[in-house]
Amino acid sequence: MNGIEESKDEGEHKEDVKADIKKRRLINLNTEVNQLESLIADIGVLDYPASYQINTAKENIMLQYAENFRQQYEYLYPDRKPLLLSPLNECRIQKFVSTTLRPTLPNHKELYTWKGCAEFVSDFLIVDPLDPITNVPSYLFSSTTVLKRQKGNCFDFSTLLCSLLIGVGYDAYCVSGYAVKEICLMDETKEICPLLQVDDKDKKKEATPPLKKYAVKPVRELQSKVEMNQEAHKQAEEKAEEEKKQRDMEEMLNLQMKDSPDIMYGLRVHCWVLVLAGKREVPENFFIDPLTGNSYGTTNERFLGIESIWNYKNYWVNMQDCKFGVKDVIFDLSDPVRWEYMLPTENQEMVPNSYEYLLDEGDDDEKEVENIFDMPPSWAQQIVIPAKDIETRCPNGEKIIQYKKANLEKYAPYLNKDGMVKRLIEYKDIECTSLVKVTEWYANRKDMLEKIERNMKTRTITEHFRNGRHLALKKHIYRSSEPETERTMTFNGKLRVDGLMSRVETPTEMTETFSERPDFLIYRNTVFAKRLKKVKLPGAIHSNYRTILKITEQFARNRKKPVNQDVAKQIFLITAEHIQVTYHREDGRITAVKREFILPPNLMQKDDQEINMDQIVMTFEVDPLAKPCKNVVLYQTMMALLKAQTASMQAVRDSEHEVREILKDRAAERSANQLSISVYDTERNDKAKEHRRTQMRMEEEQRSRRAEEEVDYLVPFLARLGQPKKISKKIAITLRNDCLADMKQRLIDKANLIQNRFEKEAFELQNKQQWYQQNQISMTKEDEQAYLSYCSEAMFRIRILEMRLNKHKETAPSKYLALEDKIRKDPRLAKKLKGC
């Protein structure tokens, strides 16, 4: 009895559980319906096409297929969660998920790669989390509606992204499954910023030059090795202590996360995109998270399981075990053991092996197989992305993403006055309290500014410029915007006349490098005297220059000159009045010819000064058997070096002036922050708008002027009658008679004028013909040719005048009758002339 009672209690308990489950399902269904109602009300679009509001016959058959598939699936796998097969669309109509995809080829080159599509979808849409996050949604809107709302859940994101990827040629699929909390909630606080990862990959290791057997040993450093080791040990300890603090902080945070385990691990539903290898030269399969736009391998631990995948042609259910995540899942969709398909394809068998006996084996004729039912076409409209959305990207034009020890800010072009479109803020600690580096990207700047890096550790600012910058400046590294401070400038030498590549400046030194110069100069180093007191530069450009102590220049090999005449290095000691010259060494030698000129005082001021070259020049010859150089040649070389010294000093002054001009221009550009606007950008180009407004105003003025200039034909006749205030019948008859008489006279005058011109031309031609008959015998060929041309032109004019006269005679009566009709219909005269 006790057993019977216990079994009854268990049965009642099961029934209560079933009733409770049904009740919860009804509550969830009502909640989802309410959510759908609010979403549809949020859209506010009522003009949907017919494909949104009704189903075709083929779509109804597809829905029956899906319902049959769902029932079999729930019967065979009662422990698995329901599949997303036929959710509601924005018009509350059931649509199969595969038909929601609309492959579209966008018209923008930015969306032709998977990375461009993923970045656009992740930036343009706002995440609307699933509610509840453990179930697939009961609704799935079209991509056009999602773009209008600019909001959606992970399934909306994936549908839009998959449609774009298929449109540009990728083998893409939507994936419904489970992921970790960070993926589902788009939490990237534990991820490294992709921009920092790219920077790490781009850093190239400096290749150490190979050691030469007979290389000259470096100069010995006169410094205590003990002190150096102690300093290095101290720095290493400080660095290790700092790293330990960071590790302890990260471990503490990890422990805090572990102390509160995720009770919903493996239950959060997520949707992402799968791209299979093969098309578009994709080497291997990979996942794309549409919420962030990041790509992952198909064995990534962040993805915990897969329920189903689909594209615009078919739907597959995963039959593989995902107990250990998706790392062991094989994406061979043609394998029916691993993937259960909904619609059979041509590559799959239509008849199971167990029913092969139903076929007639004795009949050799080919059996007509029933046509395969294919997927209905998409019911959604074609995806249209305006160029404005491509440019704006983020909602309201801005987006902030928080990464591990970094914050990334994105802005639409022209949103900020200074043209900033992106900013990356790097921190030293996980709490993001200590700044390390700030990098800002700019666009559409008139000064060609592309990027600014502010390093808080080194206290340096690095500015990057695009091609087209004044003086071909590419990069500028500095600490202070004042002249005569530490700075490094990099130039595009191919765009400069002097071939300048870089300029490194300190308060007492300036180093410049060159390339591809006609004088083969590759290096110039200038040493200045240290200022006793910092002098601020006034408005004059060439005032307060630093005193030059030494100039060192190096030259590349000029093969057109002999080795002993091709200068490799020359040093001008300005204050000491010494010049040191080193020539290029010959092939196979390790030393080169050197000369040092000790300039006598006031050399350039006295013309008759006697110079003893043996006391002035010191020469080191490589070949002891070589003939000594003549004094005349040495003198000419010394004078050429003096001219080169003057030119080098002037070049240094020009470089200082150029630095000041660059700093002055940069100060003005920072305060102005001017942006360049294309002439084709009609929305932002104020000049084009003003030009269009001016043209419209001028056209309106011209139209009004033409209307004012239209003269009333009765004005002169009313003036003859003294401008009567009221037109009586007598006055109306007088006006009519005067108008008709005037018209008749004008027609007669015009006919007489044409007749007179006709008679004049005929009389002149007759006189010319008489003159020709009288002088025909004595005329030359030129006179005869002139006579013939005159006759031809005169006959042409006579024919034209005759045609005009005939046409005038034909049209004159109709013009007269037209004026008479116009007078009779004139509202001012019609009533008065009625019956006359």
Image: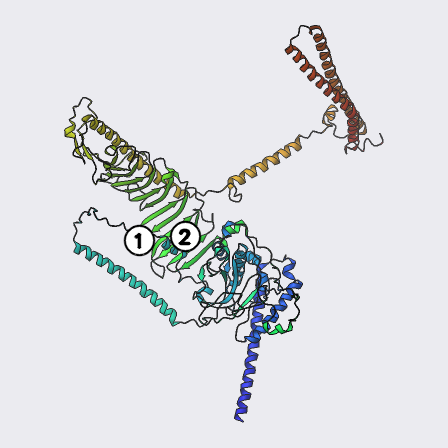
In the rendered image, residue 738, in percent from the top left (x then y), is placed at 78, 24
Whether the residues at callouts 2 and 1 have beta carbons within 8 Å, the answer is no
Quadrant where the N terminus is found in the figure: bottom right
Camera-nearest residue between 249 and 644: 644
Residue 593 occupies quadrant: top left
Quadrant where the C terminus is found in the figure: top right
Camera-nearest residue between 709 and 495: 495
Element at badge 2? strand
Badge 1 amino acid: Lys
* Residue 152 visible in rendering: no
Residue 350 occupies quadrant: bottom right
Element at badge 1? loop
Badge 2 amino acid: Arg
Crowd rating for badge 2 (residues with CA inside 10 Å; few <14, some 14–19, many 20+): many
Depicted 196 relative to depicted 728: above or below: below
Depicted 22 relative to depicted 374: above or below: below
- On residue 423, the disc is 2
Q: Which residue is mark 1?
A: 457
Q: Is 413 displayed left or right of 426 in the figure?
A: right
Figure disc tally: 2
Cα distance, mark 2 to mark 1?
Answer: 18 Å
- On residue 778, the disc is none
Crowd rating for badge 1 (residues with CA inside 10 Å; few <14, some 14–19, many 20+): few
In the rendered image, residue 320, in percent from the top left (x then y), is placed at 49, 70
- Does label 2 or label 1 sit earlier along the sequence? 2
Residue at 50 percent of width and 62 percent of height: 274
In the rendered image, residue 82, in percent from the top left (x then y), is placed at 55, 71
Q: Is 60 displayed left or right of 116 in the figure?
A: right
Q: Is 758 displayed left or right of 185 in the figure?
A: right
In the rendered image, residue 709, in percent from the top left (x then y), is placed at 66, 30
* Residue 407 visible in rendering: yes
